[in-house]
Amino acid sequence: MPRKILSPAFFRRDTLQVARDLLGKHLVRNNKAGLLAGRIVEVEAYVGPNDRASHASRGRTNRTDVMFGQAGIAYVYLVYGMHHCFNVVTDREGYPAAILVRAVEADGHGLVDGPGRLCRHFQIDRTLNKWDLTLGEGLWLEDRGERVPASRIIRAPRIGVDYAGKWAEKPWRFRLKEADG
DNA sequence: AGATTGATCCAT
DNA sequence: TGGATCAATCTG
């Protein structure tokens, strides 16, 4: 199967569509410690300036500036003083949007479930904030040829955003259902 | 259910 | 400059 690094054009589209399309793609980390990869099985979309669950809904600040920028760039931040979260910026410049990668099936390590554990596994921290994921250096996403039918995608509300009122109810979490049998 | 932990944001 | 908040995780 061909391996293709996901390009800026892949990310520079409607965020909900990119979120669905990221399921079944692979996250790859290459550093001095070696090569790690995993198949993405759960993501969440954070869409636009009005999404109260999104950091960007509070405006453009030093922290959220990256979400307003170029698609295909990493947004990595620290939550609760101890865990990192890894996102990919999507859609057009000037429109804040990103996708949080929540879970992967890690090659040789089973399910890595949860954005904090995922970052720990892949050794992702804030030094990778604003990293260009489309260059194929250090950290990137790639297509290994898997086709994911819509019937295997489960939609659900996002996790941990109860503060966001009606925006917390949006079914903007996407999970890949395992093929049964 | 409670503790943990520190970057970020804005005014209590 | 201080305090509230937080896109989570672990231990009970």
Image (cartoon, coloured by chain):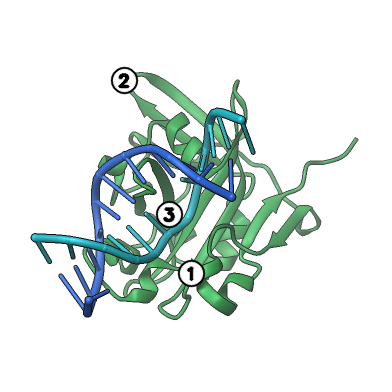
Chain colours: A green, B blue, C cyan
Q: CA distance from mark 1 to mark 2?
A: 36 Å
Identify the residue under disc 3: A88
Verify CB contact (< 8 Å) between mark 1 and mark 2.
Answer: no
Q: Which quadrant of the figure contains the N terminus of chain A?
A: top right
Task: Please name which of the two marks, 1 or 2, marks the residue nearer to the observer.
Answer: 1
* Residue named by callout 1: A53
Determine whether A165 is above or below A113 in the image. Answer: below
Q: Residue at x 39, y 75 (%)?
A: A57
Q: Vertically, is A108 above or below A111? A: above
Q: Amino acid at mark 2?
A: Lys
Mark 1 vs mark 3, CA separation in Å: 16 Å
C8 sits to left or right of A171: left
Residue A67 image point, x, y percent: 34, 64
The residues tagged by marks 2 and 3 sit, at their Cα atoms, a distance apart of: 23 Å
Answer with mark 1 or mark 2, whichever residue precedes in sequence: 2
Q: Nearer the viewer, residue A46 or A166?
A: A166
